[in-house]
Amino acid sequence: MNTLRPIILSGGAGTRLWPLSREKYPKQLLPLINEDSLLQATVRRMDGLKGVQLSAPMIVCNEEYRFVIAEQLRIMDRKGSILLEPFGRNTAPALTLAALAALREGDDSILLVMPSDHVIMDVESFQAAVLAGMSQALDGRIVTFGITPDAPETGYGYIQSGELIEQGETACQIARFVEKPDLSTAQTYLDAGNYLWNSGLFMMRASVWLSAIGKCRPDILTACQAAWDQGSADGDFLRVDKKAFEQCPSDSIDYAVMERIARQESDLPGGVVIPLTAGWSDIGAWSSLWQVLPKDDAGNVAKGDVLLNDCKNTLAISESRLVTCVGIENVIVVETPDAILVVHKDKTQDVKLVVDMLKQQGRSEGKLHRKVFRPWGWYDGIDVGERFQVKRIVVKPGAALSLQMHHHRAEHWVVVRGTARVTRNKDVYLVSENESTYIPLGTSHRLENPGCVPLEMIEIQSGSYLGEDDIVRFEDIYGRKEH
């Protein structure tokens, strides 16, 4: 039986979906459609595929997302390897590293390359297209999937399909790739009937990709090979050498290889495109999310504590408080504990400009949510003022924060649920519910949860500087050096 290995690329920042999606917790980690995050839905997308031996997925991601992705896999009770990139270098190097990792296991399996932040509503149709692509990939071709367009979309690149590879099959030759068009050009593509949206989905053997990238971009292959050879394995985490990977050029799969295949350059594998009609969306903006979510009779979508009156074609999302909308049309309203977005549906692509402004002003709302996830659990910044900050902290059973010290702040800890084991200099003691302890400035300390239920506590910080970079780590079970 043929072996298929899902390769899930999880590198996007999703700035157009701010304020839900942020640099340190991007859209692929969010449950935007149902209870699953987009990444979890991507992992499940091959469930039930018949006639194929399915390997555990490999997720390629930035190193800072490693623990939250591992936790999302754990919640699903799924196994999988997580390949860590120290820097973002676009999709071609990411796939090259994944292919090297797949070959290390001695199995030149078919790789199914999927972005982690896309939505596919019709999984059955998607799996049928994957099975159609398997035979092409087994013959040594590189397969891409083109979305059958239903509108003159200007936000996507297009693939022009050529002649059928075989009668009775769906796979076509790739005539050319074209950039995002203007509206009139997009309409001509729609009318022509042989242009498909470029989905960013691919299939090929690992060895076929390495051969193609070696011929098209030998500099990328050389850098990735060096980074891989000098890397290491740490449980489910696969690490590449940081210095070697830093030398790797940045390029996409399309630019590095696929466009040259479409031009039928010599010594390259053949390329085919398979049409796909499966309720696909890249959720590239709030208007895209509105399109795929179920709506009421007036075209409205409401998520969370939302009341709508006399509204049409509106998306309203509330995370932490009541949101009411009256008499609005074609508007997006998104509330989070620390930010509110109101934008006309026609202007949702411009949300990224707001994120750029936040970065220019040095504001944290562009990078972090108020609730910040850590490998040991999470904390929520409840209140902040001059020389003080209050956090709600939850530590998972058996987890421990690093042994650390602060130069500029002291901390008071109040346990409200569970039991804490506290290290303060040389003293180690337990703090139970409704008890508290004090960590003076400059004192080495550690917080642990020795129990079997989550530890919940309130932390009150006081001092001249309260930034997260005021942490000196002495020991850390998660191998972190940064804050």
Image: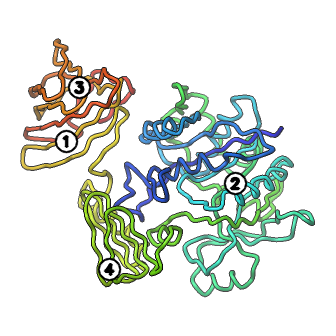
Q: Neighbour class for label 3 at 10 Å: few (<14), some, many (≥20)?
A: many
Quadrant in which the N terminus is drawn: top right
Residue 404 visible in the displayed image? yes
Q: Earlier in the sequence, mark 1 or mark 2?
A: 2
In space, the residues marked 1 and 3 are separated at their CA atoms by: 17 Å
Q: Earlier in the sequence, mark 3 or mark 4?
A: 4
Q: Residue 309 shows which numbered tag?
A: 4
Judged from the image, the secondary structure of the residue bearing numbered disc 1 is strand
Label 1 vs label 3, nearer the camera: 1
In space, the residues marked 3 and 4 are separated at their CA atoms by: 52 Å
Judged from the image, the secondary structure of the residue bearing numbered disc 2 is strand
Viewer-proximal residue among 474 and 333? 333
Which residue, given by chain and number where applicable, does mark 3 sit on? 404
Label 3 vs label 4, nearer the camera: 4
Q: Residue 113 shows which numbered tag?
A: none
Please provide percent x and percent y for residue 101: 65, 34
Q: Earlier in the sequence, mark 1 or mark 4?
A: 4
Which residue, given by chain and number where applicable, does mark 2 sit on? 202
x 48%, y 73%: residue: 295
Q: Is residue 258 above or below residue 478?
A: below
